[in-house]
Amino acid sequence: MSNINRTRTVLRCAAFAGLMAAAALPASSAPNETIPNFTPARDMSWQENFWDYILPPPPGVAHGPILTDPKYPYNSQIQNGGLFVGGDFQVAITNAQDPVLKPWAAKQLEERNQDLLSGKRTLGFNAQSRCWPGGVPGQNLFLEPIYFLQKPNEVIIMWQRNNTVRRVKLTDKHSADVKPTWFGESIGHYENGDTLVVDTIGIKGGTYHNIDNFGTPHTDKLHTVERFTIAKDGNKLSAIITVEDPDTFNAPLTLRQEWRRTNLAYEESICAEDGDANPFGHKLEPIPVAAKADF
């Protein structure tokens, strides 16, 4: 690491620690509601347990996550999301025949499958690995620790990669006119003394990396509700996520993710500095490139 990058990292860590120390836990939206503390100690983080959504989903739901095609067995929990196993490189071929998919979405997934099977593409696309935002709820699958900063009027969720920030406003309703963005507009409230409920709309459509790691598409009508719950022992965080998009799915999807408590200091991680590395010659999607400078 260069002296400049080392200095930037130290300054960012110091600024983050200052924010954590200064931020008071917010007032609850319900007068008698106990507010859960998602960051009870300095340098406390949450590390995800699973590369893909956990199976099976909770009992009684209509439909879980989109899965891989049973003709092409794949287990990311064993294969670590596509590492060499037994000499073969494994990629996820999505079940494009899932009846929950509208015809246009099934067609798009099938085209992606054919690109992978034919060798036109040699890797499935993980947005964050190529410096793109993961979107909602796809960012919950990223393999870096996450941090919560709870403030009186909002909750800020942060990831190290590219210093990615997602803001959850603690208000009672969405804006009248929401412009679609990578993370949309999220509003939240606390429940049961252990849960943060986050309702999100305005998630940018036309992309295939906002929901999962399998390329499942969606439109601007995507609506998600995430319920982040801290376990009683304080060592596990889970999320039950409901995904609705009437133009893409014939029924809501219910997803589940878990994190374990860790104690990792927040560090700087600039994706573009090494994001174009491609040592194995895979046909990777390009990293984002700005058409003009921001300043």
Image: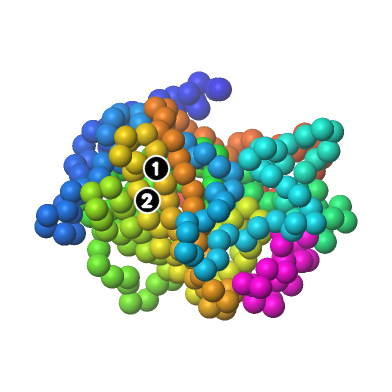
Left or right placement of residue 227 versus residue 57 in this view: left
**Residue 198 in the image: above or below residue 98:** above
Residue lying at 63% horizontally and 53% vertically, measured from the top left: 213
The residue wearing badge 1 is: 237
Furthest-left residue in view? Answer: 31
- Identify the secondary structure beneath mark 2: strand
Q: How far apart are marks 1 and 2 (CA)?
A: 7 Å
In the picture, the disc for residue 228 is 2
For badge 1, the amino acid type reads: Leu
Q: Does the magenta stretch include residue 178?
A: no
Quadrant of the rendered image containing residue 186: bottom left
Residue found at the far front of this picture? 59
Which color scheme did the rendering employ for the protein? rainbow
Q: What residue type is labelled 2?
A: Phe
Q: What span is colored magenta in the figure?
A: 94-113
**Could you tell whether 231 is left or right of 293 in the image?**
left
Residue 255 position within the rendered picture, expressed as x and y whole percent measured from the top left: 51, 57
Q: Which residue is drawn at 37% across and 76% down?
A: 177
The secondary structure type at the circle numbered 1 is strand
Q: Residue at 83% across / 38% down in the picture?
A: 88
Residue 150 or 84: which is nearer the viewer?
84
Graded by Cα atoms within 10 Å as few (under 14), some (14 to 19) or many (20 or more), the crowding at tag 2 reads many
* Lower position in the chain sequence, tag 1 or tag 2: 2
Marks 1 and 2: CB-CB under 8 Å? yes
Quadrant of residue 200 within the rendered picture: bottom left
**Image quarter of residue 277:** top right
Q: What is the quadrant of the N terminus in the image? A: top right
User: Image check: 144 left or right of 116?
Assistant: left
On the question of residue 220 being in view, the answer is no
**Residue 39, image x, y percentages:** 30, 37
Q: Is residue 99 part of the magenta span, yes or no?
A: yes
